[in-house]
């Protein structure tokens, strides 16, 4: 998506519908059904959020896998996945044997908006997670403007238990980027965005960054439809896959920048 296109898209954002507040999943009952969301410990580089989509595969954001200071990709052996992490314990602990970022992703890209469009990574765990109570999430179609989605994530000030926002809005939907009204913060990068139908939650997108549009906080997310297939293809052939201000949008996280303030959750 070009800078101009995204600026125009953001300038035309509709008003958000009624949203639910962020709720902490502090107990086993609270977390039931969400334990395949986990905390990714990135060596000494902090943490992100990831989601189990196969017994041995975790989906997250590509930028999580880079040292913010050096720009060097973190070694897979320095990454750990704590599935269902809650108050000092996890449902399952796994190390990571392989990390593949989207083939079009460039951590050092000067255009931070372009960087969002391919901000996906797959982590292959050292061993599969096979527990009756911890079932990998299925995938769903890309939501469109006006749809209601949910987000489960860890973040600063809520790093010891996941939190869920059960209803936030797709404010704008494009092939490359979704703009959501969801509440995200540092640590939320890589968090799964869910569509829930008939009681079944399916992952439809991944949180890349939080941003501001004329002072209004929004989240930028990566649709999975085409990007995830490209990522799976890269993993299948063994490629590491890593390569590597518009208008009045302020990027708060997910990169650095002025004007359109991007931020890096």
Image: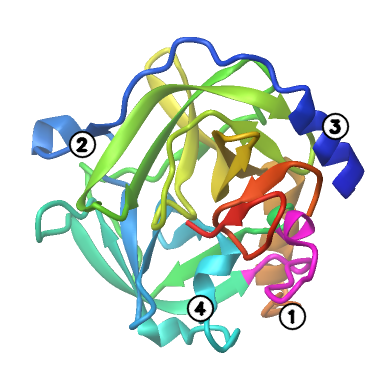
Q: Nearer the viewer, residue 66 or 250?
A: 250
Magenta stretch, overall SS: loop
Please state which of the two labelled residues, at mark 1 or mark 3, is closer to the viewer.
3
Q: In this view, does 250 lie above or below 29?
A: below
| Mark 4 nearby-residue class (10 Å; few <14, some 14–19, many ≥20) | some
Which residue is disc 3 drawn over?
8
Q: How is the image coloured?
A: rainbow
Quarter-of-image position of residue 5: top right
The numbered dot on residue 51 is none
Which type of secondary structure does the marked residue at label 2 adopt? strand
Which residue is disc 4 drawn over?
98
- Left or right of 115 in this view: 199: left
Q: Earlier in the sequence, mark 3 or mark 4?
A: 3
Please state which of the two labelled residues, at mark 3 or mark 4, is closer to the viewer.
3
Task: Point out the stretch of residues depicted in magenta.
Answer: 101-115
Which residue is disc 2 drawn over?
24
Q: Is residue 196 above or below residue 51?
A: above
Which residue is disc 1 drawn over?
244
Which type of secondary structure does the marked residue at label 4 adopt? strand
Measured Cα–Cα span from mark 1 to mark 3: 28 Å
Quarter-of-image position of residue 132: top left
Q: Where is residue 80 in the image (x, y as percent from the top left)?
A: 32, 73
Name the residue rendered at 60%, 84% in the picture.
71
Q: Which of 69 and 197 is in front in this view?
A: 69
């Amino acid at each position: 998506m070009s800078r101009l296109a995204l600026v125009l898209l953001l300038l035309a954002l509709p008003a958000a519908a009624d949203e639910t507040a962020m709720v902490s999943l502090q107990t086993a009952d609270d977390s039931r059904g969400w334990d395949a969301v986990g905390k990714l410990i990135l060596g000494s580089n902090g943490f992100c959020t990831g989601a189990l989509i196969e017994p041995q595969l975790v989906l997250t954001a590509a930028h999580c896998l880079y040292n913010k200071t050096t720009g060097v990709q973190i070694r897979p052996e320095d990454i750990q996945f704590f599935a269902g992490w809650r108050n000092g314990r996890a449902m399952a602990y796994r190390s990571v044997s392989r990390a593949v970022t989207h083939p079009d992703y460039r951590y050092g890209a000067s255009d931070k908006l372009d960087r969002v469009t391919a901000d996906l990574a797959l982590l292959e765990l050292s061993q599969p997670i096979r527990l009756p109570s911890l079932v990998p999430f299925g995938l769903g179609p890309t939501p469109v403007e006006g749809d209601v989605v949910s987000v489960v994530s860890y973040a600063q000030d809520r790093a010891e238990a996941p939190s869920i926002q059960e209803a936030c809005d797709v404010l704008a939907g494009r092939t490359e980027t979704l703009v959501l009204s969801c509440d995200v913060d540092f640590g939320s990068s890589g968090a799964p965005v869910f569509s829930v139908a008939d009681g079944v939650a399916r992952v439809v997108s991944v949180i890349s960054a939080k941003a501001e549009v004329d002072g209004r906080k929004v989240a930028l997310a990566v649709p999975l439809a085409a990007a995830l297939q490209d990522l799976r293809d890269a993993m299948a052939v063994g490629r590491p896959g890593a390569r590597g201000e518009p208008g009045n949008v302020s990027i708060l996280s997910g990169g650095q920048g002025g004007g359109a303030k991007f931020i890096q959750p």
